[in-house]
Image: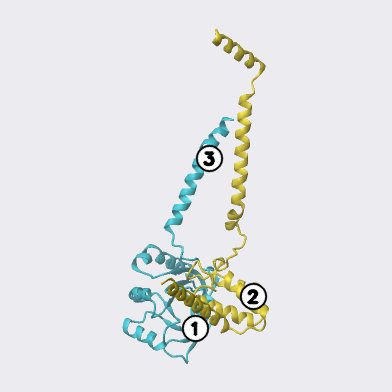
Chain colours: A yellow, B cyan
Amino acid sequence: MIRSLLVTVAAVFVLISAASAENENSYKFDNEQQRATYQQLTKELRCPKCQNQNIADSNAPLAEDMRDRSYQMLKEGKSREEIIQFMVARYGDFVHYQPPFTTATSILWWGPLLIVVIGIGVAIGLTRKKKAAVELTPQERERLQQLRKSGDE
Amino acid sequence: MTKFRWLILFGPLVLFIGLVGFLLKGLGSDPTELNSALIDEPVPQFEVSDLYDTEVTYDQSVLHEGPLLLNVWATWCPTCRAEHEFLNELASRGIPIVGLNYKDDSREKAVNWLNTLGDPYTVNLFDPQGEVAFEFGVYGAPETYFIDHNGVIRYRHVGDVNERNWSNQLQGIYQQLLEEAE
């Protein structure tokens, strides 16, 4: 029983990897460098249709079109940046998994830092207040002593 | 010191209420609805053939005689079927709609669809490979672009156009484009 299950699982894996290999092989690259750029690009470009997948993983027709276009542009000698810009111009910043630094996204970068700074500030403020409360003036100490004495009697 | 005390006491509450408001807004919005990257950009250049007669070709100048709507559709798209009758209605009200047939199964199917359901479009563009749609950043069908009299894309609506969203929102956008054109 377990063995047959294992065999089935293995067969499925082989089929999946064969399918993806076939996909890759339908593109002919000029050199290994180009293939590497292509693979990197399809991993960092996001499919607008199935939003949490990159275009390498997605089977949506749109992802296929975007892969084809990336491949064509690489073959035409376009650089990685040019292709990303081409996609962003049509599909917006959304399409790239590395969003640019803008006023809208700056909060994501500075927000956590700001919260840490506020936290440290509050912590310092609270400890200082405690210290101040503990320290008594000489007069207060005398009064405290007196109170203690009167309490003993 | 007392001033700061109020700030320390109520600051977190104010922050919390702000955060709740922000997250509530996020709950109501549809994450699959993306803003077009082409808002306030002129329509991209293209060359495309007519759906009925592939001998006839058009370029981006057919979208310069706005304000008009550009509707992206296909016969494989059920939502396009749902909105089709309302597009007919809009066309009968005199609103020019250019149709972009997007990656359809076949030209015959698309022509047949228009023959049986009615043709609301002033011009029918045929884009079997989705090349023109790619230039517009189309990521599904149906999508409807609002193009002004200068041929500038002003708004993109994702999903079907119907009586409700037309009267609530889209009509206002179209009216504004009309007023600007005068």
Q: Is A38 above or below relative to A106?
A: below
Compare residues B133 and B71 and report the one nearer the observer: B133
Can you tell which of label 3 and label 2 is closer to the viewer? 2
Residue at mark 2: chain:
A
Compare residues B167 and B51 and report the one nearer the observer: B51
Residue B162 visible from this viewpoint:
yes
Q: Which residue is mark 1?
A: B129
Task: Report the number of discs.
Answer: 3
Q: Look at the image and tell me in which quarter the N terminus of chain B lies.
A: top right
Kind of residue indicated by mark 2: Thr
Specify whether B100 is left or right of A114.
Answer: left
Q: Residue at x 62, y 35 (%)?
A: A125
Q: Which residue is mark 2?
A: A37
What separation in Å lies between label 3 and label 2 (alpha carbons)?
A: 49 Å
What separation in Å lies between label 1 and label 2 (alpha carbons)?
A: 25 Å
What separation in Å lies between label 3 and label 1 (alpha carbons)?
A: 56 Å
Residue A130 is situated, as x and y percent measured from the top left of the image, at 60, 29
Compare residues B60 and A28 and report the one nearer the observer: A28
Specify whether B130 is left or right of B116.
Answer: right
Specify whether A94 is left or right of A138.
Answer: left
Q: Is B144 above or below relative to A72?
A: above
Tags 3 and 2 on a common chain: no
Q: Secondary structure at mark 2?
A: helix
Say whether marks 3 and 2 touch (CB < 8 Å): no
Compare residues A153 and B120 and report the one nearer the observer: A153
Q: Secondary structure at mark 1?
A: loop
Residue B123 is situated, as x and y percent measured from the top left of the image, at 43, 82
Residue B65 visible from this viewpoint:
no
Q: Which residue is mark 3?
A: B11
Outermost residue, top direction? A153
Where residue A46 sits, quadrant-wise, is: bottom right
